[in-house]
Amino acid sequence: VILTQPSQLITLEYDYIIIGAGTAGLVVANRLTEDTKITVLVLEAGVSDEGVVPAIAPFLATMLTPNTAYDWNYTVVPQKGMHGRTFSYPRGRLLGGSSSANYNFHQYGSAEDWDRYAKETGDPGWAWNNVKKYIKKHEKIVPSADGHDTSGQFIPSLHGSSGEVSVSLPGFNLSIDARVMATTGQLSEFPYNEDTSGGDHSLLGIGFVQSSIGKGVRSSSSTSYLANANSRPNLTVLINATVVKLLQSGTKGALKSFRSVQFSSSPDSVTMTVKARKEVILSAGTIGTTQILQLSGIGNASDLKALNIPVLVDNPAVGANLIDHVYMPNVFNAQESLDTFLRDSSRLGAAIEEWTTNKTGIIANNVANTFGFARLPSNSSIFKAVADPASGPKSPHWEMIFSNFWTCPGIARPATGKFMTIVTALISPTSRGTIKLRSTNPFDKPLIDPNYLTTEFDIVVLRESVKASKRIVAAPAWADYVISPFGRLSATSDVDIDNYIRGAASTVFHPVGTAAMSSSGSKSGVVNENLLVKGADGLRIVDASVFPFIPSVHTQGPVYLLAERASDLIKADQLYPSAERPPLDEL
Ligand SMILES: Cc1cc2nc3c(=O)[nH]c(=O)nc-3n(C[C@H](O)[C@H](O)[C@H](O)COP(=O)(O)OP(=O)(O)OC[C@H]3O[C@@H](n4cnc5c(N)ncnc54)[C@H](O)[C@@H]3O)c2cc1C
């Protein structure tokens, strides 16, 4: 049941309290309530996603953030690697969390990403060979909205057919799709990739986007995992409930227990306290989880003391190691584009009408159909100075996304002109940032500093990706389409290209790492290999914040797989304390 007021709660004690009804939180809520004896309360700060058209209509996703009631409306602190600029840092603030607000790209990471997590935690359970089985539980591949023949556009054996989240190939042909595919035959540097989900298949090359869309509508954790569990009497979801703090509820040996959760409906409302009999699970996302830990006295002691917050667990890793992908919009003047359509409210209105009636047409489609991944050449001189930070020799350094319209976040579409954008993105960043409290007020936004582009490696990769975008449009496939680079993309010297990048780059919305997992014995990290908070009892973290390195792909798929495995870990702990538990597969 989904409640809107705290007064509707019939009890203040549950087996598990999950903080955040987002991507990960709703997976865990669904899996734990499969056992009818287990009671779960999910506390969500945001609002309902029901009837929120930009959260449902895939092509309208970009209207949902930033600066709306469905966004946390964060900004980053001035970025020294980006000419001191600050900009929006969207996060979904509604049921489904960022899975209701994202751009629907759906992938799983490279096998090497997961194998690196296994190495970092000392737990082979996080290796790809083990994690990949969760695809079947999670994914339901469905026909694309236009019903076209998708053979050769994905490899069915790599996918699930009966899981929770619907995933499909493009549902509306975009004018540039055929040109992008022709490019793969014309430039040996960018071969065709038959399946872009990653895992057992290489991410390198260019292929079709797989999207969390089914029957022309978004498939989020809310419309899947929650919708499929919502009728269970043992699951309660309370929206409009912002968690302000965890309270110490006792001790277990040397550990402090955190099974009490304080929340409030608004800055002016009274706070209420709910209790977990078994565990509190933090799934508030990289920003929310970090802020809640710090408000609760779990974090860097000197930072907490500076705000007069009593230090309950001193761990400088909380809020450190913020990692994100970097978004670089490279715009070209083009012969034709969707910009004319997007400026024409009557044509756009008719398209929305078609979608409302039939769930077809461009509004049923994702914002892009084709994309790809690439590596720097292995003889790049940067590797003389820097060890390759990718998760392995088969994992990418950068990404390219093809879009036949203006896609510069924060910069309005010019009143005239036709554009094509090749977004390139830094996928293996070496810069690391921080999330810190601005104040002790839980309704104050934290200080988010991704510290983008502060290493030589990061700027080199983006510079090479910008140069590559021009090599791409020089292929014959674009001869009668691309006219010229737009604006400062015309820069040719490295210095000028770097200036152009630092002046235009922003976020790909993939923050991870501020509550990183590491092995139980390691002094680094925030959670152990079972995602239990180090130095604490009764407290687990299941969301993007626990990835110690950023996945080489769009992050929702890795979060879903993480949450599926986390659910199994939590269930196993109901049977055995972690230390004595046999391998999950033997249970
Ligand atoms: C605009 C945008 C576009 C993106 N595009 C893509 C894409 O195309 N493909 C892709 O794979 N990934 C994409 N991502 C990233 C992806 O969506 C996230 O990595 C992933 O959803 C994160 O999951 P999570 O469970 O960690 O956090 P979230 O899904 O963000 O969930 C956190 C939840 O906790 C709630 N919460 C936070 N603080 C509190 C509190 N104090 N009390 C109660 N509740 C709280 C939030 O409201 C939210 O519902 C995008 C993200 C954004 C924002």
Image: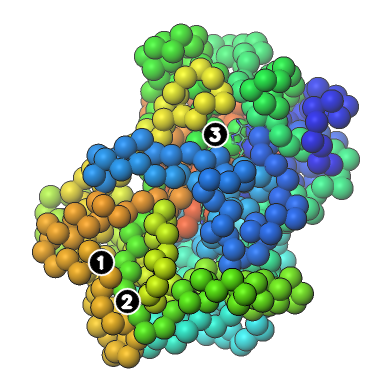
Residue type marked 2:
Asn
Residue 265 in which image quadrant: top right
Q: Amino acid at mark 1?
A: Gly
Left or right: 204 as drawn, with respect to 194: left
Q: Residue at x 56, y 57 (%)?
A: 63
Image-based side of 267 in relation to 130, left or right: right
In percent of the image, x 17 and y 66: which residue is there? Answer: 491
Q: Locate the C terminus and report the quarter of the image it occupies.
A: top right
Find disc 1 in the rendering and name its residue: 487
Residue 566 on image: x %, y %: 61, 42
Helix, strand or loop at label 3? It is: helix
Q: Quadrant of residue 267?
A: top right
Specify the label residue 288 is tagged with: 3
Kindly report the distance in space between the C-alpha atoms of the residues bearing marks 1 and 3: 37 Å
Spot occupied by residue 36 in the image (x, y as percentages of width and height): 86, 41
- Assess disc 1: are there few (<14), some (14-19) or many (≥20) residues with their C-alpha within 10 Å of its C-alpha: few
Q: Give the residue type that dot 3 points to.
A: Gly
User: Do we see residue 121 in this rendering?
Assistant: no
State whether label 3 is within 8 Å of ligand 1. Answer: yes
Work out how far the residue at label 2 is from the one at label 1, CA to CA, in angstroms.
9 Å
Q: Residues within 10 Å of mark 3 (few under 14, many from 20)?
A: many
| Residue at horizontal 48 percent and vertical 63 percent from the top | 199
The residue labelled by disc 2 is 333
